[in-house]
Image (cartoon, grey):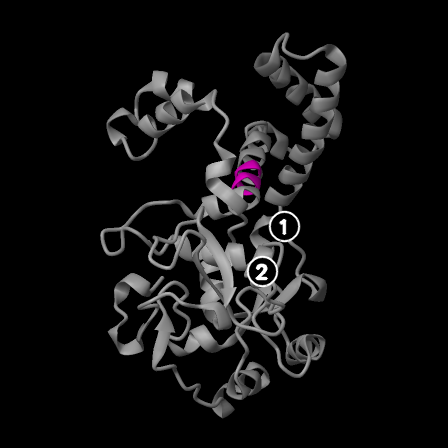
Amino acid sequence: MTLHIESQLAGSILQPNNNWDISVQKQLSAFKNPDYLIGPRVDLLQGDISREWFKWIVDQFVDKRFFNEKTNFFEIYTDVRDSIELLIGNQKDEDDKQKISELISISVEQRINFLKQDDRNRKNITTTIKEDLLTIYGQEPRCWLTGLKFSQEAVFNFTAKKVDKQPIQLPTFVDRYRPIGTNERDLCIEVDHLFPFSYGGPDDLNNYRLICGWANRVKSNHITGYSTGTKVSGASKLFPTSFYYWVIRTLGLKRKCEVAGCNNNITNSELTVCSQLGSSKAITPVSMKVICKDHDNRENRYIRRDSVKERFLL
């Protein structure tokens, strides 16, 4: 096992010199990740990998010929079945290959039907819809991903005419790992599609969520943390802006303070992240731990808003 870990470390991004070595890549693909070193974030990280991979798996079977209006499910299935035969060969028996082909064909057909209508227009979010959402969220609405409690001005502006909107006061300090408040939009109420509209999500009340402007920009139409990329910028090598999505991904999935015995959650508290390995350790998608402000002991978390430069802007 130790030798496996040594091989994995040698072939990781920490050793970019062999990043293009196919023999190292094949060796790494045969190893199971050391989950005991990842800790409680293994469900989030592995789950999102599966989401990304299965999207790619389905998309590889999409053929431009399927966009013909006369294409039916049988034609899609026949094509997928041929492709499955090429991919799997004798690794599965005929019954398994038939079942796999049927399941993938259903997803491919759904994908094709969506792509055929990718020019559909969003509905206008009317004042009535906004009022309905505020009613659903109660007297103290919060961002569904960060737990940010919206100010009275933000609530008023959500349904007000542009000429009547009130200024929203910006904070003196912002959380460097979740910098909400560098501009007024960050603190505004916006409407998010839980299931992204661009992926075929319905444009109706059941799919709407109230979200702060900052989280809406970060979340965008991404469905996993990996879909944002993991490029490290020179401005912040330990916490690049691409990690902002991992912050809201973690907050949005865990939804409560992970300190033992704490009952604070996203419905009654503002949440952020720290490192599960200690207050001085770098925060990465692997080490993120959800905490409320009652348990925040990280030094230098808050910085002056007017000192925030381009590296915090998306």
Dot 1 corresponds to which residue?
200
**Residue found 56% across the figure and 52% down from its top:** 198
Q: Which residues are magenta?
A: 45-50
Q: Quadrant of residue 19?
A: top left
Position in image of residue 191 (x %, y %): 58, 69
Q: How many marks?
A: 2
Tell me which amino acid carries mark 1.
Answer: Gly
Which of the labelled discs sits on residue 260, or is there none?
Answer: 2
Position in image of residue 279 (x %, y %): 37, 59
Which mark is first along the chain, 2 or 1? 1
Badge 1 marks a residue whose secondary structure is loop
Q: Quadrant of residue 167?
A: bottom left
Residues marked 1 and 2 touching at CB (< 8 Å): no
Please tell me whether mark 1 or mark 2 is closer to you in this view: 2
Image: 186 above or below 164 = above
Tell me which amino acid carries mark 2.
Answer: Ala
Q: Is residue 8 left or right of residue 20?
A: right
Q: Please tell me whether the stretch drawn in magenta is mainly helix, strand or loop.
A: helix
- Please tell me which residue lies in front, 229 or 83: 229
Q: Residues within 10 Å of mark 1 (few under 14, many from 20)?
A: some
Q: Quadrant of the N terminus?
A: top left
Asked whether residue 172 is drawn in magenta, I would say no
Q: Is residue 203 left or right of residue 281?
A: right
Badge 2 marks a residue whose secondary structure is loop
